[in-house]
Structure formats: structure tokens, C-alpha cells
Image: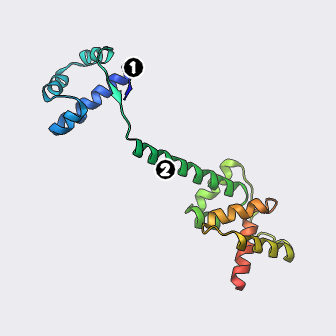
Amino acid sequence: MLPLQDAQVRLVLLNHVTVRLADAAQDELHAAGIEMEQLAHLRQLSAVDLSRLAAMRSLTIGVTFDGAALRAGLRAVALVNEARALETYFIRHGASTHLMSALFKLRRKLTLKRRRDIGARRPAGRVPLPDYATRERIYQAWRAIADPSPRVRYYRLHQEFQHIPIAVLEAVVREFEADE
């Protein structure tokens, strides 16, 4: 258990516990270390008295975490941040609104807004394709990437051809896949 020292945090927590446990079952109260009569007394305290109680160092108020749930929550936050960073990478490196919609489920307007927000410029209209030999190299690299995730495949493809905007890579892949 992590003991809480700050009187304001302790006061907020006491208020929360008093309200939260008002409708709690006996086993929940017991699990929280509070008896029914203590809860009734807590509920009768004035705001000033509750503040005094929160300031008492002799009263131990602490927090415990469910380790597995915390680990899952941290992983979820990391995945969201990773996806957001990948979205930004794609927008910054010239991905089309169509590709952003397909890979990240971003609407066209949101993609355009994010593009403006980060100052990424992309010419309007169809993108000019590189020469045929370069297009073949791009498609061979695309086929060599074994990952099933299109996000990862386009990212790795762009890592190999960093001088080419992602929209051009997308157009080359589509062109070759349409011919198959």
C-alpha cells in the first residue's frame, strides 16, 4: 500500500469513500477496512471535521493497485501513443487521405486538419510516379515484407524508400496489385 501524505488528497479521498461506500455491501466495507458504524459516523462529520480528520497523520490512508490491471492499462496507453505516433509519421510523410482512412480509420477532414496542424504539405491531384525500374524495386520490397499489418508494411516500405512520399508508394503498390 502506498500511504498518502497530502492533506488535500486525503480529504478528497475521504469524501469519495464516504459517498462511494454509502450504498456498499457489508463485504465491500470490510474489504475497505471500514465498519458500518464508522461509515455512519464519517457521513455525519461536517466539512471542517472531515478536513481535520484528513490532516491527522495517525490515520493511515493509502492506495493499492491491481498489478495486472495496471499493466494492461499501461500497455493500452502505450499502444494508443504508438498508433498516434504512426499516424503522425504517415501524415508527415505524405500519406493520402484514402490511405489514412484505410489504415487508421481517419476521416478525410481530420487527416487534412492534422496535416495543417503539423505543417505537412502535399500537392493536390495525382502524384507523379517514379520510373518503371524504381516502381518494380518498390513493389518487390513490398512483397518481401512479411508482416500482415498494412500499417507496418507501408512504414517499412517507406523506411526503405524515404525519399519517396508514402502516397507515391501507395500508388505503386496499387498499380502492381491491379495488374496481378
The residue sitting at 72% across, 49% down in the picture is 119
- The residue located at (38%, 37%) in the rendering is 65
Residue 163 placement: quadrant: bottom right
- The residue under label 2 is 76
Q: Amino acid at mark 1?
A: Gln
Q: Residues within 10 Å of mark 2 (few under 14, many from 20)?
A: few
* Residue 75 in sight in this render: yes
Q: Quadrant of the N terminus?
A: top left
Label annotation for residue 149:
none
Left or right: 117 in relation to 162: left
Q: Are marks 2 and 1 in contact (CB under 8 Å)?
A: no
- Within 10 Å of disc 1 (Cα), the crowding (few <14, some 14-19, many 20+) is some
- In the displayed structure, would residue 32 be above or below residue 120? above
- Residue drawn where x is 70% and y is 85% of the image: 180
Q: Secondary structure at mark 1?
A: loop
- Looking at the picture, tell me which residue is in the foreground, 178 or 97: 178
- Pinpoint residue 101: horizontal percent, then vertical percent: 59, 65
Q: Is residue 99 left or right of residue 54?
A: right
**Residue 56, position as x, y percentages in the image:** 31, 14
Residue at screen point 59% across, 67% down: 102
